[in-house]
Image (spheres, helix red, strand yellow):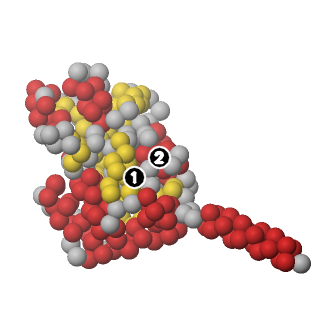
Amino acid sequence: MNRVLSGIAVAAMAIMGLAQVANADALDDIKKSGKIRIAVDLGVPPYGMTDDKMQPAGSDIETAKLLAKDWGVEFVHVPTTGASRIPSLQTGKADLVISTLSITPERAKVIDFSKAYAALRTVIAAPKGVTLKSVADLDGKTVGTVRGTTHDTQLTKEGPKGMKLVRFEDDATEQQAFLSGQVDIFSTAEMLVSQVDKKNPARQVEVKFVLDNFKLAVGVKKDETRLLEEVNKWIDAKLKDGTLNAIYKKQFGTDLPDLILKQ
């Protein structure tokens, strides 16, 4: 009889152990490891870039480091590009994505988004002598874009049939294509246009028109509910105490827009 009871007890403990494993989630894994792996693209200054010592820098890096510090865990930078941000979550390579990731219905089907922590304006840019006032004016034109970005998606859907879209893997490659004359028109984040102009002032690049304004959020793997809740709590606290606004203002010279502060 005792052997039977002992066997039942062992089986019950085994079942409980399996249940604990099944209930374990990303937040538990982060706490257990003492590390948080956050994907940040370093090719989108001043959100993500390298400093003069070739170390990761920018507002997204500062945001990621702050989150790790507040949670009492080590920040581990996961290099990424625009196209690989979401796959890094889906494959378990990263715990979070803090990398100019704007909220879109398409992306929300495959990952979860936190509340917005910053903002991004996307534009069409070209040399001064090129006249462009709207997406319709791109008909018959070759336009550069960065694969997997919101401006890639928008131009794919809304661009005229006669427009030829050339996709590049990251902003640096796209900028080099413009500077070398491979493309004359390109979509990008607004703050990058002045940086491109400084690299080659002879091309006289300028913003032609705005594509859209986007809220930037932290990307979380689907159904990691507890992790998402903790990220949202953290964003609420950092918006309330002004820390996220200070990070944004340091890089862009202006306060966060109302669409972020009053969400």
Q: Quadrant of residue 12?
A: bottom right
Look at the numbered disc 1 and give the secondary structure of its residue.
strand
Q: Is residue 221 visible?
A: yes
Look at the numbered disc 2 and give the secondary structure of its residue.
loop
Residue with the mark numbered 1:
37
Expressed as whole percent of the image width and height from the top left, the position of residue 214 reads 35, 56
Looking at the rendered structure, the kind of residue marked 1 is: Arg
Q: Residue at x 16, y 54 (%)?
A: 251
- Asked whether the residues under the numbered discs 1 and 2 touch, taking CB atoms below 8 Å apart as contact, a structural biologist would say yes
- The crowd level at tag 2 (other Cα within 10 Å; few <14, some 14-19, many 20+) is some
Q: Residue at x 28, y 42 (%)?
A: 42
Looking at the rendered structure, the kind of residue marked 2 is: Lys
Q: Quadrant of residue 199?
A: top left
In the image, taking residue 252 as reference, residue 96 lies left or right, namely right
Q: Is residue 151 visible?
A: no
In the image, taking residue 117 as reference, residue 153 lies left or right, namely right
**Looking at the image, which is closer to me, 132 or 36?**
36
Residue with the mark numbered 2:
93
Instruction: Kindly report the distance in space between the C-alpha atoms of the residues bearing marks 1 and 2.
Output: 8 Å
Identify whether 193 is placed above or below 218. above
> Residue reaching furthest front?
2
Q: Quadrant of residue 17?
A: bottom right
Identify whether 77 is placed above or below 166. below
Expressed as whole percent of the image width and height from the top left, the position of residue 60 reads 28, 54
Q: Earlier in the sequence, mark 1 or mark 2?
A: 1
Is the N terminus in the top left, top right, bottom left or bottom right quadrant?
Answer: bottom right
| Res. 211 mark | none
Q: Residue at x 33, y 57 (%)?
A: 74
Expressed as whole percent of the image width and height from the top left, the position of residue 122 reads 30, 48
